[in-house]
Amino acid sequence: MQINTKAGIKDLAGKDILNKEEVFTIGEAVANILINSELKGVYKTYVLAKKFYNDKKVELDEADVLLVKEAVEASKSYTVLVKGQLLEVLEVKEK
């Protein structure tokens, strides 16, 4: 599965959410969640966080998708507005 990390997170009206005058991206949100997670597999989580933050697209295998989903669901860093969009991207791409 390939994820476009530069896609923006939207508000309920469909407008991009800004972070310091720049679009808040899927990559930034996932990187922050992963880097703050308490999941096992610290090095794998760290590597994925760097990829989500730096790369335009990230290729995930099934195990990576499960790891990211687990981290997003367990995260207390963001509201349902952000977490829901992240999970939606992972679900839609998975089908």
Image (cartoon, rainbow, N blue to C red):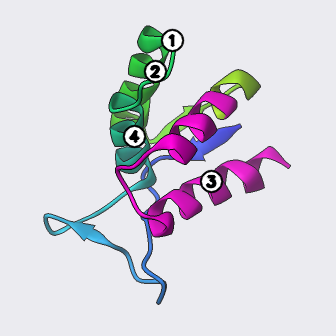
Distance from disc 3 to disc 4, alpha carbons, whole Å, reads 12 Å
Query: Is residue 60 placed above or below 24 in the rendered structure?
Result: above
Q: Are marks 2 and 3 in contact (CB under 8 Å)?
A: no
The amino acid pointed to by label 1 is Gly
**Sequence-first disc among 4 and 2:** 4
Query: Between 44 and 50, which is closer to the camera in this rendering?
Result: 44
Residue at 43% across, 36% down: 52
Determine the secondary structure under disc 4: helix
Residue position for label 2: 45
Counting from the top left corner in percent of width and height, residue 19 is at 21, 64
- Mark pair 1, 4: CA separation: 14 Å
- Amino acid type for the residue under numbered disc 3: Leu
Q: Amino acid at mark 4?
A: Ile
Q: Are marks 3 and 1 in contact (CB under 8 Å)?
A: no
Query: Where is residue 18 drawn, in percent x and y?
Result: 25, 70
Dot label at residue 33 = 4
The residue that disc 3 covers is 87
Task: Determine whether label 1 and label 2 are within 8 Å by CB.
Answer: yes
Would you say 46 lies left or right of 73 here? left
